[in-house]
Amino acid sequence: MRTAIDPEVERARRAGGYAEFLRVPTMSGGVYVLPAGGTDRQSPHSEAEVYYVIRGHARFTQGEVEAAADPGDVLFVPAGAPHRFHAITEELVLLVVFAPAERAADRPPVRAPTDRVRPTPRSRRPAGSR
C-alpha cells in the first residue's frame, strides 16, 4: 500500500539518501533513507534536529548514549552533537526537521507547494500552544 510519504522516499533514494521537501528561514524538513546494512556518514550539524522514525529498525547513538530507533520513535539532537544511525536491520525511513533551516551548501533552498504544507489555523491549535 502506497502512502503519502512514498514519493518523497523515492526521491530521497534517487538523491543518495536525503531529499528536502520544505525550507523556510526557521526550519527545513526532509526525508532521510538508509538501506538495511547501510552506513550513516553524517557529521554534527550547526542546527538542532528532530527525527521521526517512519519505518525500519536500527540503533541510534548520540554522544555516549545508544538506543533503539523503531517506527514511531522521536529523536532529538541538539546542534553540534555527534550522532549516527547504525546496525540498520531494515530500511530506515526518517522524517527530519532542522531548526533553523539546514545550511548545507549542497542543498539548495526548496519551498514546498502551498497545497502540500499548510500551517495549522490558529483556532485549531491545542490550548496552550502558540
Image (tube, rainbow, N blue to C red):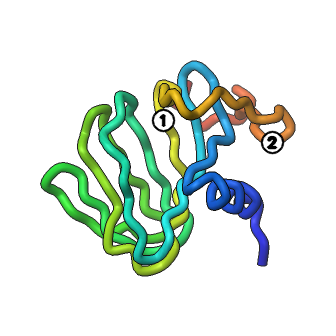
In the image, which disc is placed on residue 116?
Answer: 2
Q: Point out the residue furthest to the left here.
A: 64
Q: Quadrant of residue 84?
A: bottom left
Q: Amino acid at mark 2?
A: Arg
Residue 101, position as x, y percentages in the image: 52, 27
In the image, taking residue 124 as reference, residue 103 lies left or right, namely left
Q: Quadrant of residue 118?
A: top right
In the image, which disc is placed on residue 32?
Answer: none
Q: Amino acid at mark 1?
A: Phe
Q: Residue at x 48, y 35 (%)?
A: 98
Spatial distance from mark 1 to mark 2, Cα to Cα?
A: 19 Å
Q: Residue at x 32, y 43 (%)?
A: 43
Residue 72, position as x, y percentages in the image: 49, 65
In the image, taking residue 1 as reference, residue 100 lies left or right, namely left
Q: Is residue 37 above or below residue 53?
A: below
In the image, taking residue 5 as reference, residue 61 lies left or right, namely left
Q: Is residue 69 above or below residue 23?
A: below
N-terminal of the two: label 1 or label 2? Answer: 1
Residue 12, position as x, y percentages in the image: 63, 55
Q: Residue at x 30, y 36 (%)?
A: 78
Pointer 1: what residue? Answer: 98
Element type where label 2 sits in the image: loop
Front residue of 30/129: it is 30
* Badge 2: residue crowd in 10 Å (few <14, some 14–19, many ≥20): few
* Badge 1: residue crowd in 10 Å (few <14, some 14–19, many ≥20): many
In the picture, which quadrant includes the C terminus? top right
In the picture, which quadrant includes the N terminus? bottom right
Q: Point out the residue furthest to the right here.
A: 115
Residue 32, position as x, y percentages in the image: 54, 54
